[in-house]
Structures are given as structure tokens and as C-alpha cells.
Amino acid sequence: MNAGTGTRPESYTIDPEIAEVVATTLKAVADPLRLRMLALVASSPDGQASAGDLAELADVSGPTVSHHLRVLKDVGVLTSQRQASWVHYRIAPAFAPVVRSLLDIFVPAARAAQERPHELTGLSDVDRALSSLATELAARHPDVPAPQVLATVRESYTALARHATARQHLVALTRRFADQRLSDVRAVASPSPQKAPQVLFVCVANAGRSQLAAALVQHYAGPAITVRSAGSAPAGEVHAAVLPLLTELGVADAAYPKPLTDDAVRAADVVITMGCGDICPILPGLRYEDWAVGDPAVASPAGVSAIRDDIDRRVRALLTDLLPDLHLPEPALPAGTRPAQS
């Protein structure tokens, strides 16, 4: 019993039956080949993969592949359906957000741990730097009360510090993020009929799909559209496979994962989710779309190119709808090309 509250310990944890189900599922997923199978299915543009595709992932026998697939089906993570000569596998709808979060968060974190075994040190006097930054941003946003500016700056720093990889850049990233948030606060408090349409792209990690979609909107529409991107569980850095594409669009240096905020949603005219499920808040009066596109974090170079082309087509269609008079040039990147490897 908790001495402070008189509440028994089991009141603070999950039921034993649920714990058993979760543990069984985690055990089923905790195999390198099964993880690669899930990644292949999750990153496929059409959200499925055949048994033949999955068998090519490793030099193992057919019965071994069947065994691994059966384990994932038995715990409900995968579903299957025969189509012509092959059985095709999909992530079960109930597990889709979980699998996406697992891959979007753990895979980049594992890569970062391999590439950066020694964490970089941060600022010795963060509070003074943030106070100076708040003074600077208060001058840029005079209609926002100074205490609110300071609170936004500190909240932004804390939110970014939870996941940022390059900590020596945190104050610079905080300046961008807090400035963006304050602009959204002003847009909500004093809406203008002349303001540019605002589009918000949301995915889990804000490290691939949403970054690329936002970059393409900015490339095609410029200041005619205000564009934001955010993640329900931001990664530490933008995915390596996506950076060459952002470099081609001239925005790689400005791209960084950031968390989803209520102000960004309220300020948006269109909210487009890209694999974050029901995590994005739903507010009345807004236009919502869900784009079912593959995840470049776990895709092959050819898969990244296909995902990029898919997002490009969707972005161009969105802009045609929002800005009928906008002249759209040819696609930003040649269709079918592969990003440079890094």
C-alpha cells in the first residue's frame, strides 16, 4: 500500500491480463528478421508485401519465413490475404500506429547511437540564453505579452531538448520553433481574411514524410502558403534518406523534427496527417486529410524515390485546390530518381 495515499500499488499499473498480451506481442516482434518484415510491409507504398518479397529479406528457407510470418499473425500484428499466386501481408489496423511509432522512433535512435557514441555537451548557461532569446522574440511579436513569450521560449527549448541529437544547436532551433509558435498564436488571436492559407503536415517522427511534404509546398508555393510540419513523437534528427531530397529543395539546413502543438493545429486551415493515426487533435471547422504514404525511414532507395513521387503528386493536387491560379512548374525532382546516399 502507498503510505502517502493509502492506494494499493496495483492501482498504478496495468492489469496482469493486459501485461501478458503486451509481453507476448513484444516477444513476437523482438526478432531482427521479423522487425525487417514489419518495416518492409509498413514502408510499402500500398501498405502490403507479398510472401515472396518478405522471403527475399534473408537467406533462410521458405518454412523459416513462414514460421516468422505465422508468429506475427498469431499475435495479431499482421493480417494476410491471397491475391492471385501470392499471399499478401498488411499491418493489422489496430497495430498500425504502434508499428509506425516503433520504427519511426527506435530505428533512427539506434542509428544515432551507432554513429554518435559520445553525446555532445550543451550550453552551460541555458537560462540566460533563453532569456536573451525571449527578449529578441518579444520585439518581433509585440502584441504577445512578454511573459507568454518567455514561457513559449522555455517550453520550446524543453520540448526540443527531449529528443534533439545535436544539442549544441538547441538555442538556434529553439529560436526557429518559438518564433513559429508565436506566429501561430498571433494568427489565432487576430485572424486576417487576407492571410495566406496555412497547411500543417503531421507524422509520427517529423523526420521524413511531413518534412518532405512541407518542403515541396514551400518550393512550389513560396509565401503564398504558410506551411508547418510536426511530429506526435519527434525523432532526434531528420532521416538520412530524406536529407538529400531536402538538400535538392534547398531546405535541409532549416529542417529539424519538432513536436505537435495545439497552436499549430488551431492556426491551420488544412491539417494533413501522414501515419500518426488519432494522435493529432481534431478541432471543429478545420479541413483534415490523411495521406497513406510509405515511410522513407525504413525504405530502400527505390522505395524512398517512390514515396517522394507519391508525396509530390499529392502536394501538387493540394496546391491546385487551394490556389487555383498558382502556376505549378514541373515536378521539383525528376520522377523515379534515387536520392544520393549518405
Image (cartoon, helix red, strand yellow):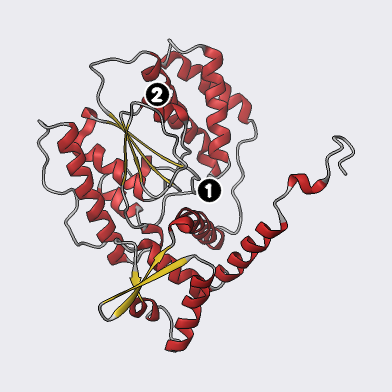
Q: Which mark is residue 277?
A: none
Query: In the image, what residue occupies the spot 53% across and 24% down?
Result: 152
Foreground residue among 148 and 273 = 273
Q: Which residue is denoted by mark 2 in the rendering? A: 184
Count numbered badges in the picture.
2
As drawn, the residue found furthest toward the right would be 3
- Locate residue 184: give its quadrant: top left
Residue 342 visible in the current orientation: no
In which quadrant will I find the N terminus? top right
Q: Which amino acid lies under the numbered mark 1 shown in the image of this protein?
A: Thr
Depth check: give the residue in front, 147 or 167. 147
Determine crowd level at label 2: few under 14, some 14-19, many 20+ residues with C-alpha closer than 10 A: many
Q: Quadrant of residue 299?
A: bottom left
Q: Which is in the foreground here, disc 2 or disc 1? A: 2
Few, some or many residues within 10 Å of mark 1 (<14, 14–19, 20+): some
Res 70 seen here:
yes
**What is the secondary structure assignment of the residue under circle 2?**
helix
Q: Element type at marker 1? A: loop
Q: Residue 103: percent from the left, percent from the top?
A: 48, 59
Q: Which residue is mark 1?
A: 165
| Quadrant where the image shows the C terminus | bottom left
Figure check: 35 above or below 275: below
Q: Position of residue 180 (x, y in %)?
A: 41, 28
Residue type (three-letter) at the residue carrying disc 2: Asp
- Across and down, in percent, residue 223 comes to 23, 28
Q: Residue at x 34, y 80 (%)?
A: 52
Residue pictured at 44% horizontal, 71% vertical: 37
Q: Nearer the viewer, residue 314 or 72?
A: 72
